[in-house]
């Protein structure tokens, strides 16, 4: 199948599946006209709950008749799941066309598979300047291919726990280091911190983003919710919004 042939070529552009750096994707996106600077995005970072958070945001925005683009990973059945534009997955022929364009512009330069897919997403997303992009961060975030935005509407921090420890030195396999990798480079816009597994994790996040000038809202401090019979949702007026 033609789509699988292109995917195979993209997977062979770099000898490593993961090589934490932003240099390669920045160079490619510059050749593509820096499409990441032409979109409106909400970034979702964390360890657990990223996909469900994006699904919830997608449903809310669709109900409000706001069209979305969505970039997630990994896919469950088909790679098309990662590329949602105007509220629908791209078809095979659309993916083939997109991948071939970016592949040609990249001109066989070294690029990890995830970097290639991320560049393809940004390139396509720039065609929908009015849409909201829901972007799931990959490994850690600080050197993740999705972390090349200069601005976004908001960053949502889901539950953070120890994960992918093999990519960290043994003396740095701590929750403090994981929190640093995931939140130290969040953009200066709005940061929403979801419920965390422990008070220690929440305090680590607060310490890491202390100098970030974003408006920050923390679960159980600035907003809360309940799924009970008398369910409710509220948040303080930090965003000048509802309660």
Image: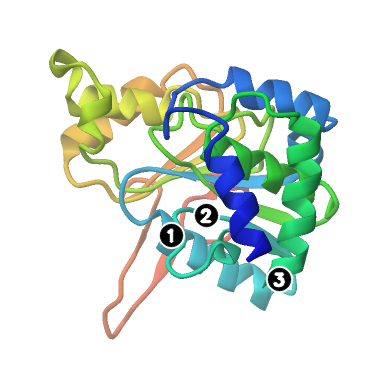
Mark 2 vs mark 1: give the one in front: 2
Residue 13: x %, y % from top left: 57, 32
Q: Tag 1, which secondary structure?
A: helix
* Mark 2 / mark 3, whichever is N-terminal: 2
Q: Nearer the viewer, residue 80 or 146?
A: 80
Q: Tag 3, which secondary structure?
A: loop
Name the image quarter holding residue 9. top right
Q: Residue furthest left?
A: 171
* Mark 2 / mark 1, whichever is N-terminal: 1
For the residues labelled 2 and 1, the Cα–Cα distance comes to 7 Å
For the residues labelled 2 and 3, the Cα–Cα distance comes to 16 Å
Residue 44: x %, y % from top left: 49, 47
Q: Nearer the viewer, residue 116 or 228?
A: 116
Residue 76: x %, y % from top left: 42, 66
Residue 18: x %, y % from top left: 42, 31
Could one spot residue 134 in this view of the protein? no
Horizontal side of residue 187 vs 170, given as left or right = right
Q: Tag 2, which secondary structure?
A: loop
Residue linked to disc 3 = 91
Crowding near pointer 2: few (<14 within 10 Å), some, many (20+)? many
Residue linked to disc 2 = 72
Query: Residue drawn 25% across and 46% down?
Result: 196
Query: Residue drawn 62% across and 39% down?
Result: 116
């Amino acid at each position: 199948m033609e789509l699988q042939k292109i995917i195979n070529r993209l997977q062979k552009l770099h000898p490593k599946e993961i090589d934490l750096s932003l240099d390669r994707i920045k160079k490619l996106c510059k050749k593509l006209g820096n499409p990441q600077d032409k979109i409106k995005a909400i970034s979702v970072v964390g360890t657990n709950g990223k996909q469900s958070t994006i699904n919830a945001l997608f449903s809310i925005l669709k109900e409000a008749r706001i069209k979305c683009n969505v970039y997630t990973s990994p896919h469950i059945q088909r790679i098309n799941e990662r590329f949602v534009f105007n509220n629908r997955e791209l078809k095979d022929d659309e993916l083939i066309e997109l991948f071939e364009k970016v592949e040609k512009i990249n001109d066989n330069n070294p690029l990890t598979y995830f970097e290639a897919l991320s560049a393809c997403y940004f390139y396509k997303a720039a065609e929908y300047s009015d849409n909201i992009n829901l972007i799931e961060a990959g490994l850690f975030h600080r050197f993740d291919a999705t972390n090349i935005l200069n601005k976004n509407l908001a960053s949502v921090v889901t539950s953070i726990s120890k994960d992918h420890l093999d990519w960290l030195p043994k003396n740095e396999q701590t929750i403090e280091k994981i929190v640093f990798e995931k939140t130290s480079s969040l953009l200066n816009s709005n940061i929403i911190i979801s419920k965390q597994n422990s008070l220690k994790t929440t305090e680590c996040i607060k310490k890491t983003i202390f100098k970030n000038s974003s408006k920050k809202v923390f679960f159980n401090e600035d907003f809360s919710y309940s799924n009970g019979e008398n369910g409710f949702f509220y948040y303080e007026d930090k965003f000048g919004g509802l309660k």
